[in-house]
Image: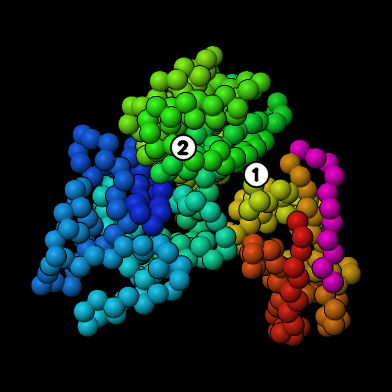
């Protein structure tokens, strides 16, 4: 990763624990913050503690001793309670769960070495198990009180975090397919990564497969995991396999490792998703072609463009790019209307010469001379990530006052 000023933050968050990592100038790869210096104690409980005799909150320590003391109040499940809009009563004080989660994130960020001001943060990428419009809105709003704008926050699911991690490994590890095996508790699943196309950017597809539950007994667990690995990898050309999750720790693998290591490299780690989020935050901040595009149900499949005339030439003004999260789409511009009262939107796949065209009719627009109507065009994410356009008549100065007319359209990508 090229040297750049500022911090690029990755966060992996769930209701039980959170990891935070960072990349900044002079680092070869992202670092993950540990609760204990020199150890891989990356999982920070998603808990706020309130010590006796004070209203201040703090994080749990590495051994969780603050939570075990009877005189310490602690608040857990901050993510789920925030999504539920819960009001939490502690003593005589009532707290909104989202504000507590925002405070938790603030304290996490204070743990990043060398980060003295949040203005140093260039981009934050937050990894969550699943994304929808509700959870995205929550996190975009949570960080604003910390002085971190919505434009500097992005959210990733399992597939995208794995994609960024795998596609930023050495070339020999991503020559062919990659696979990630995940086991939390006894539940085993995998993410299988394939690449389509030979020209940059290649398209990255990730499929998720639930593989069932592993037995609790070590000997049976090893055989069951080996069988699951064999079924997933049969007939596949895989450069690297990755393992993560507490359910794959403990040194019980023997037969499974023999299967995994046949013709491929195998890595086990506790911080894969948070490192992937760090890579994602850096790449999105740079807005450069990383050589790959990741698509999922919440990603735009096509560029969204306005067809405009500029200095007698036809050109296309990009409002959103393929590969962007539909939940985070937010763009606006102003145009002068020429010709028919309509806005022409083009939907174009990367590398394709063909496009779908949508004409947004501006019914009952006041009649004015050509190029004497200024329009505000906004593209944003509606409910369930549906794309919405809003067009507002701004008139043309004192000559042609604004009519106040607005037009709203929902479009299918």
Q: Decide whether the magenta segment is chiefly helix, strand or loop.
A: strand
Q: Quadrant of residue 58?
A: bottom left
What residue is rendered at 52% in x and 61% in y?
A: 136
> How far, Cα to Cα, is label 1 from label 2?
30 Å
Percent position (x, y) of residue 333? Answer: 66, 64
What residue range appears in magenta? Answer: 351-361
Which quarter of the rendering shows the N terminus?
top left
Circle 1 Cα neighbour tier, 10 Å, few/some/many (<14 / 14–19 / ≥20) = many
Q: Secondary structure at mark 2?
A: loop
Discs 1, 2 touching: Cβ within 8 Å: no
The answer to whether residue 316 is above or below residue 330 is above
Percent position (x, y) of residue 306? Answer: 76, 58
Reading the image, the residue beneath label 2 is 214
Q: Secondary structure at mark 1?
A: loop
Give left or right: position of 71 versus 42.
left
Percent position (x, y) of residue 292? Answer: 62, 35
Residue 353 in view: yes
Residue 354 colored magenta? yes
Circle 2 Cα neighbour tier, 10 Å, few/some/many (<14 / 14–19 / ≥20) = many
Reading the image, the residue beneath label 1 is 295
């Amino acid at each position: 990763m090229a040297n750049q000023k500022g911090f690029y933050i990755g966060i992996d968050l769930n209701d039980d624990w959170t990891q935070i990592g960072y990349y900044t100038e002079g680092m070869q790869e992202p670092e993950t913050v540990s609760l204990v210096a020199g150890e891989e104690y990356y999982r920070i409980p998603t808990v706020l503690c309130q010590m006796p005799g004070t209203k201040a909150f703090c994080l749990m320590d590495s051994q969780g001793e603050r939570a075990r003391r009877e005189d310490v109040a602690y608040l857990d499940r901050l993510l789920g309670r925030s999504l539920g809009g819960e009001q939490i009563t502690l003593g005589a004080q009532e707290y909104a769960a989202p504000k507590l989660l925002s405070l938790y994130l603030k304290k996490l960020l204070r743990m990043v070495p060398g980060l003295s001001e949040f203005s140093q943060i260039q981009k934050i990428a937050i990894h969550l198990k699943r994304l929808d419009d509700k959870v995205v809105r929550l996190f975009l709003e949570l960080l604003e009180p910390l002085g971190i704008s919505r434009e500097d926050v992005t959210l990733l699911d399992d597939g995208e975090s794995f994609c960024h991690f795998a596609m930023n490994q050495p070339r020999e590890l991503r020559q062919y397919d990659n696979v990630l095996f995940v086991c939390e508790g006894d539940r085993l699943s995998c993410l299988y990564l394939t690449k389509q196309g030979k020209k940059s950017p290649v398209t990255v597809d990730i499929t998720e497969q639930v593989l069932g539950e592993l037995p609790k007994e070590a000997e049976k667990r090893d055989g069951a995991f080996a069988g699951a690995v064999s079924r997933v990898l049969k007939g596949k050309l895989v450069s690297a396999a990755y393992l993560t999750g507490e359910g794959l720790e403990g040194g019980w693998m023997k037969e499974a490792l023999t299967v995994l290591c046949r013709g491929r490299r195998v890595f086990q780690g506790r911080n894969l998703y948070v490192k992937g989020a760090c890579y994602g935050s850096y790449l999105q901040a740079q807005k450069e072609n990383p050589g790959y595009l990741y698509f999922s149900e919440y990603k735009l499949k096509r560029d969204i463009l306005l067809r405009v005339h500029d200095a007698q030439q036809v050109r296309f003004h990009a409002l959103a790019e393929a590969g962007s999260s539909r939940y985070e789409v937010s763009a606006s511009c102003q145009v002068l209307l020429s010709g028919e009262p309509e806005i022409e939107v083009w939907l174009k796949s990367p590398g394709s010469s063909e496009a779908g065209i949508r004409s947004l009719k501006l019914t009952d627009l006041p009649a004015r001379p050509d190029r004497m109507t200024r329009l505000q065009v906004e593209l944003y994410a509606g409910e369930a990530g549906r794309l919405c356009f809003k067009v507002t008549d701004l008139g043309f100065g004192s000559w042609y006052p604004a009519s106040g007319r607005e037009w709203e359209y929902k479009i299918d990508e």
